[in-house]
Image (tube, rainbow, N blue to C red):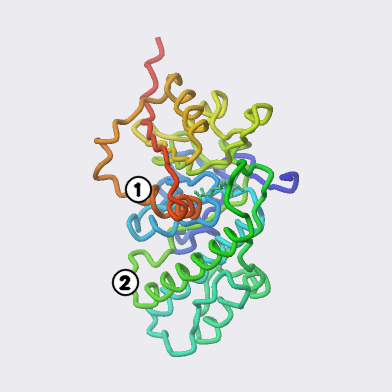
């Protein structure tokens, strides 16, 4: 249930400095008391989130793209509280690992490789002298240390014939743990552009209040990667791509921006392209035009759901769309 979700009354009320403290300008750019117009917000802002991973799950895409686009703010939207917390903790641990390197404090014993396993990733880093700054990075150890891998997934939407759930969960958790250890080790070497300061997550329902969080045209990329398929016909209205929702996505996505989709459920692929193909604000992008787009490789390989499909040798269907300019008003 999402009845406890909070949202700002407008994008200028949204304080992104909590999510990206390293990008906050010194005078604070999201001052809710100030009646500032859009232009002045932008001049007082080092950056606003520009890439949005809708239903980011465990955040694989976010952490893959963060070092490729160190100057872009990348945000995951996730409705499940535990999963959003997991992503927040992971970003926190990776930032600490990268910061500890920058401060020359990557001493032995500063072990942040425990992210997601239920141990106090952040407190061990702090114990080695790393003090986080503001925002989610400043949340209590208790909070950051409680998020074990929330591996129990909802089966309500599982397709008939899916591999055994518990076995799959165990494999997911093992993969995830190995991946986390690699990421933290790399962050500690200092070879990660941007030090994960540009990645964050927001617990929100993407089907509600998107224009409360994001300005018109704020986003340059939106990702819909392995969205919940809602197999049964009666549940199709819960799908995250629909004509109504596409109008909202077109509002927050700037002309020229790209909306990416991928799924291993062929019926859902047909559903998504069916809606996008007929929507006046979007045009399909031929795959050949995206050959040099680094996001595409990440889309195919970096998400947790995508990795599971690779492991089970399943098929995937990909399609990307460009946000068309709005027609002139006559
Ligand atoms: N994109 C990830 C990946 O490829 O690994 C996760 C895919 S998972 C099948 C779908 C995710 O979308 C889940 O984590 C679910 O909680 C989230 N989700 C579903 N509906 C949502 C909504 N309305 N708003 C935000 N997140 C949502």
Residue ID at (42%, 64%): 196
Residue 68 in percent (x, y) is at: 32, 57
Q: Assess disc 1: are there few (<14), some (14-19) or many (≥20) residues with their C-alpha within 10 Å of its C-alpha.
A: some
- Please state, as top left, top right, bottom left or bottom right, where the N terminus lies in the image: top right
Q: In the rendering, which numbered label is found on residue 204? A: none
Q: Which residue is mark 1?
A: 295
Q: Is residue 169 left or right of residue 321?
A: right
Does the CB distance between marks 2 and 1 fall below 8 Å?
A: no
Q: Nearer the viewer, residue 271 or 83?
A: 271
- Please state, as top left, top right, bottom left or bottom right, where the C terminus lies in the image: top left
Element class at badge 2: loop
Vertical order, 6 against 58 (above or below)? above
Q: Is mark 1 within 8 Å of ligand 1?
A: no
Residue 101 in percent (x, y) is at: 38, 79
Residue 100 in percent (x, y) is at: 43, 79
Q: Nearer the viewer, residue 189 or 228?
A: 228
Q: Is residue 55 left or right of residue 39?
A: right
Q: In the rendering, which numbered label is found on residue 191? A: 2
Picture mark count: 2
Report how far apart the C-alphas of labels 2 and 1 lie in the structure. Answer: 20 Å
Residue situated furthest bottom in the rendering: 108
Tag 1 or tag 2, which sits nearer the N-term? 2
Q: Is residue 28 left or right of residue 234?
A: left
Residue 112 in percent (x, y) is at: 50, 78
Residue ID at (55%, 83%): 124
Residue ID at (57%, 69%): 116
Element class at badge 1: helix
Vertical order, 198 against 10 (above or below)? below
Residue ID at (54%, 72%): 115
Vertical order, 163 against 214 (above or below)? below
Q: Is mark 2 within 8 Å of ligand 1?
A: no
The quadrant in which residue 106 appears is bottom left
């Amino acid at each position: 249930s999402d009845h406890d979700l909070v949202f700002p009354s407008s994008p200028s009320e949204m304080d992104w400095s909590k999510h990206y403290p390293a990008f906050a300008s010194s005078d604070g750019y999201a001052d809710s008391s100030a009646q500032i117009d859009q232009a002045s917000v932008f001049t007082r802002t080092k950056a606003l989130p520009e890439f949005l991973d809708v239903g980011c799950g465990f955040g694989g895409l976010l952490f893959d793209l963060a070092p490729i686009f160190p100057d872009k703010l990348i945000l995951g939207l996730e409705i499940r509280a535990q999963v959003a917390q997991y992503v927040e903790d992971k970003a926190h641990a990776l930032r600490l690992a990268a910061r500890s390197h920058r401060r020359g404090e990557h001493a032995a014993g500063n072990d942040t490789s425990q992210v997601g396993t239920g141990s106090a990733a952040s407190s061990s880093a702090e114990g080695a002298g790393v003090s986080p700054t503001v925002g989610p990075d400043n949340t209590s150890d208790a909070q950051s240390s409680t998020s074990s891998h929330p591996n129990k997934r909802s089966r309500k939407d599982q397709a008939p014939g899916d591999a055994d759930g518990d076995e799959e969960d165990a494999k997911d958790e093992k993969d995830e743990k190995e991946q986390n250890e690699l990421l933290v080790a790399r962050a500690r070497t200092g070879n990660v552009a941007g030090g994960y300061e540009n990645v964050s997550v927001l617990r929100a329902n993407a089907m509600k209040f998107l224009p409360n969080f994001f300005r018109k045209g704020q986003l340059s990329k939106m990702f819909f990667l392995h969205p919940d398929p809602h197999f049964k016909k009666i549940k199709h209205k819960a799908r995250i791509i629909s004509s109504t929702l596409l109008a909202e996505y077109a509002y927050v996505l700037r002309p020229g921006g790209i909306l990416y989709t991928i799924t291993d459920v062929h019926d859902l692929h047909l559903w998504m392209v069916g809606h996008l193909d007929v929507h006046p604000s979007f045009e399909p992008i031929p795959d050949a035009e995206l050959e040099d787009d680094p996001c595409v490789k990440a889309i195919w390989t970096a998400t947790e759901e995508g990795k599971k499909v690779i492991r089970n040798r399943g098929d995937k269907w990909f399609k990307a769309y460009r946000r068309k300019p709005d027609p002139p008003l006559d």
